[in-house]
Image: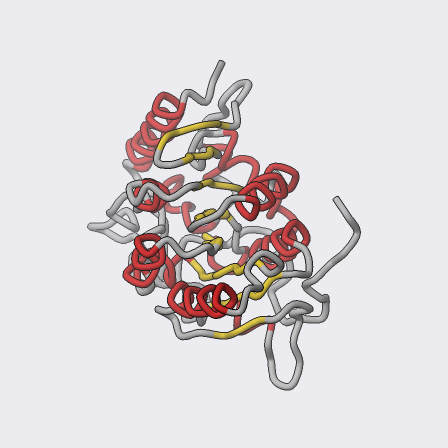
Amino acid sequence: MENDHLFAPGHTACTGCGQALGVRLVLKAAGRNVITTDATGCLEVFSSAYPYSAWEVPWIHSLFENSAAVASGIEVALKVTGRLEQIKVIAQGGDGGTADIGLQALSGMFERGHDVLYVCYDNEAYMNTGVQRSGLTPYAARTTTSPPGRLSWGNARPKKDLPAIAAAHHIPYVATASVGYPYDLDKKVKKALSLGGPKYIQLHVPCPLGWAHEAALTIEIAKLAVQTGLYPLFEMENGVLSAVKKIAKPKPVEEYLKLQGRFRHLFQKEGGAEEIKTIQGIADENIQRYRLVG
């Protein structure tokens, strides 16, 4: 990788923030000739405390729901002025701003065929407003709106399969990535930007605050999500699976869960072992579906 950081230090992200690392890696892969949009969320809050900015490329703050729509307008303007070949457009949002609040605008961007890369920083909850559940919160995770208790094991719904929703639009490129694998992310961002039309990358970014883990464990936890099969890394082109990151020997999901306070109740409450079996089943299904082993 080139030593050219386009996301400056000195911002106000938490220590160990996976999203701060993620955006730095995305911009490093993309280079200087980009215009970015960014939905309201953690990234916007910690990167742009007035009068300062961590962005060393053009950056536009959008509302929670319309990062994809704003990016679409920028793409059209560049196309009309004949500069789209020189300048790429990257839309950004968190998992709440992408999978829930901004899904309509994202689908519209896909349908209209705008030449935009959308990056979803997936930290699996609404972190900037108090760790509320989002559509990408995993099963059984503790959030402030899905607390475990006498009648609850935490979030009762499975994680929304947003890459499959994106792929169903038959856009040129869909990929999942992780800050635990920076070279894989670098390759996918560069590949996406080399293709015309709409592209979608969902980037797994651990959150020490919301996941209640030690800040020093961000990369280890990101890797364990992949190595257990809970966060498969793959690419889809024109709606068809084209590549996966293989796992030599899948690790049991307990190794991933036990490092995070949001899953602590699974190890403390009677009956937690059955819930962990359910989560292991989700990982096993991913391993089989994407042929992650072998």
The image's colouring method is: secondary structure
Question: Which residue corresponds to the image point at 42% horizontal and 35% vertical from the top-left?
Answer: 237
Return the residue nearer the eye: 216 or 151. Answer: 216
240 vs 75, left or right, is left
**Extreme residue toward the top, this view:** 294
Residue 67 x/y as whole percent? 42, 67
Please say if 37 is above or below 163.
below
Question: Which residue corresponds to the image point at 30% horizontal and 38% vertical from the top-left?
Answer: 270
Give the quadrant of the N terminus.
top right
139 vs 195, left or right, is left
Please say if 188 is above or below 106.
above
Return the residue nearer the eye: 274 or 130. Answer: 130
Return the residue nearer the eye: 189 or 183. Answer: 189
Residue 160 x/y as whole percent? 30, 46
How many numbered badges does the structure rendering display? 0
Question: Which residue corresponds to the image point at 44% horizontal and 60% vertical from the top-left?
Answer: 94
Question: Which residue corresponds to the image point at 61% horizontal and 61% vertical from the top-left?
Answer: 34
**Extreme residue toward the bottom, this view:** 51
Residue 209 x/y as whole percent? 52, 60
Please say if 114 is above or below 128.
above
Return the residue nearer the eye: 160 or 129. Answer: 160
